[in-house]
Image (cartoon, rainbow, N blue to C red):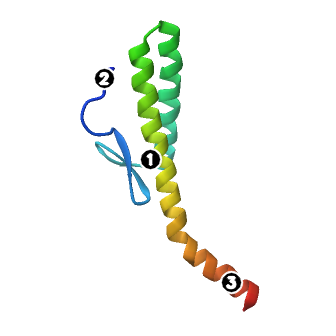
Amino acid sequence: MSPHRTGPLAYWHSGGTVESRLGPITRTRAQQLLQFYADEVLAGFDRGDPAAVIFCARTSIDLAEAVLVADAWRAAADGPKFARYTKLRRYG
């Protein structure tokens, strides 16, 4: 793995999904990858490898942002259904 990112993001969101260069990944897999990158950040500090720390930190931030925005997108997509249901239950 190169310590310098080149080209497009490794992880991004598309609608309600998290995408990687190899295609969509599940939320569970995204969480596993976030844990991996966090561990690598700490290992990079222990090794005195600032390039690895920066690369893994930036990648984890990209991945975390993709997860959060995908979750928000799904919540917004489900929001009107939930709002209609609660309105009917409350006033219907």
Label 1 sits on residue: 66
Residue type marked 1:
Ala
Q: Residues within 10 Å of mark 2 (few under 14, many from 20)?
A: few
Quarter that holds the C terminus: bottom right
Seen in the picture, residue 22 relative to 90 is either above or below; the reply is: above
Question: Picture coordinates of residue 68 (x, y %)?
Answer: 51, 49
Q: CA distance from mark 3 to mark 2?
A: 51 Å
Question: Picture coordinates of residue 79 (x, y %)?
Answer: 57, 71
Direction bottom: furthest residue: 92
Residue 9 is marked as none
Q: Secondary structure at mark 1?
A: helix
- Residue at position x 48%, y 21% from top? 40
Direction top: furthest residue: 48
Direction right: furthest residue: 90
- Residue at position x 52%, y 56% from top? 71
Q: Is residue 3 left or right of residue 65?
A: left
Residue 4 is marked as 2
Q: Earlier in the sequence, mark 3 or mark 2?
A: 2
Q: Residues within 10 Å of mark 3 (few under 14, many from 20)?
A: few
- Residue at position x 52%, y 66% from top? 76
Asked whether the beta carbons under mark 1 and mark 3 sit within 8 Å of each other, the answer is: no
Seen in the picture, residue 75 relative to 34 is either above or below; the reply is: below
Residue type marked 3:
Lys
Q: Is residue 50 left or right of residue 72?
A: left
Seen in the picture, residue 25 relative to 32 is either above or below; the reply is: below
Question: Picture coordinates of residue 23 (x, y %)?
Answer: 31, 48
Label 3 sits on residue: 87
Residue type marked 2:
His
Q: Earlier in the sequence, mark 2 or mark 1?
A: 2
Q: Secondary structure at mark 3?
A: helix
Q: Is residue 43 left or right of residue 88?
A: left
